[in-house]
Amino acid sequence: MPATALAPEAVVGRRITYTHPITGAALDGSILLIEEGTLIRFRLDGHRMRITAQASSEYVQYLPQVAAIPPMPVGRFHPIPDELAGVYAMVPVANVGDLLLLTDDVEAAGAAVQAYYTANSWDPSTADLSTLVQRWVAFEWPEDTSVLSWSWSYPADDDHDGALQMYVLPAPASEE
């Protein structure tokens, strides 16, 4: 399909499956609007951010259902790389003071820390990988749906619905 033509399936409310270009995960969502004739803007189920893609993108599969657009989500969720600081050494990373490394593999976590430090022009040798700790982390959308930002917490254990086990590099103690 030429880039100048809008796919006939591209209509507001159309359900889609988006194949994430980094993770390869198939994620369902809904088209929110059509922009500039050939661009679609959609939101993935359980997420607040909007993604824009060409209507003919190889990453978008149109599903047969057209429905009302779901309300903004609230509560616990599992983040995708686009909602975090990015992906480093194939590991999604969030910098919230502590560095949250969305993997349960300590070697992958260490490689991600090194890549994150390098990408941010920090000396990777200053990262104290001996302080990496495995924790349960919960991500949550606030009740206020006008706010796009999320919060996080360290639940005590995996009994907390929606928590993810990952490695955390604690923020260095400030020298005062």
Image (cartoon, grey):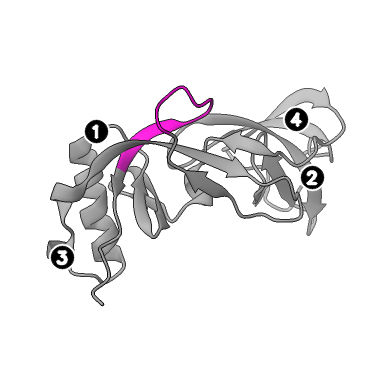
Q: Earlier in the sequence, mark 4 or mark 3?
A: 4
User: How far across and how far down the image is residue 121, in percent?
Assistant: 26, 72
**Residue at the image position 22 percent from the left and 45 percent from the top:** 132
Q: Which residue is mark 3?
A: 126
Assign the magenta stretch its main secondary structure: loop
Please state which of the two labelled residues, at mark 2 or mark 1, is closer to the viewer.
Answer: 1
The local crowd at label 2, few if under 14, some if 14 to 19, many if 20 or more residues have their Cα within 10 Å, is many
Residue extending farthest to the right is 68
Q: Nearer the viewer, residue 33 or 77?
A: 77
Above/below status of 107 relative to 39: above
Q: Which residues are magenta?
A: 156-167
Give the percent coordinates (x, y) of residue 154: 43, 40
* Residue located beneath label 2 in the image: 32
Whichever of labels 2 and 3 marks the residue nearer the N terminus, that label is: 2
N-terminal of the pair, mark 4 or mark 1, is 4
Q: CA distance from mark 4 to mark 2?
A: 10 Å
Q: Is residue 54 above or below residue 157?
A: below
Q: Amino acid at mark 3?
A: Thr
For the N terminus, the quadrant is top right
Marks 4 and 1 close (CB-CB < 8 Å):
no
144 left or right of 60 in image: right
Q: Report the residue marked by disc 1.
A: 105
**What residue is disc 4 on?**
15
Helix, strand or loop status at disc 2: strand
Instruction: Tell me the distance, in whole angstroms, between the alpha carbons under discs 1 and 3.
Output: 21 Å
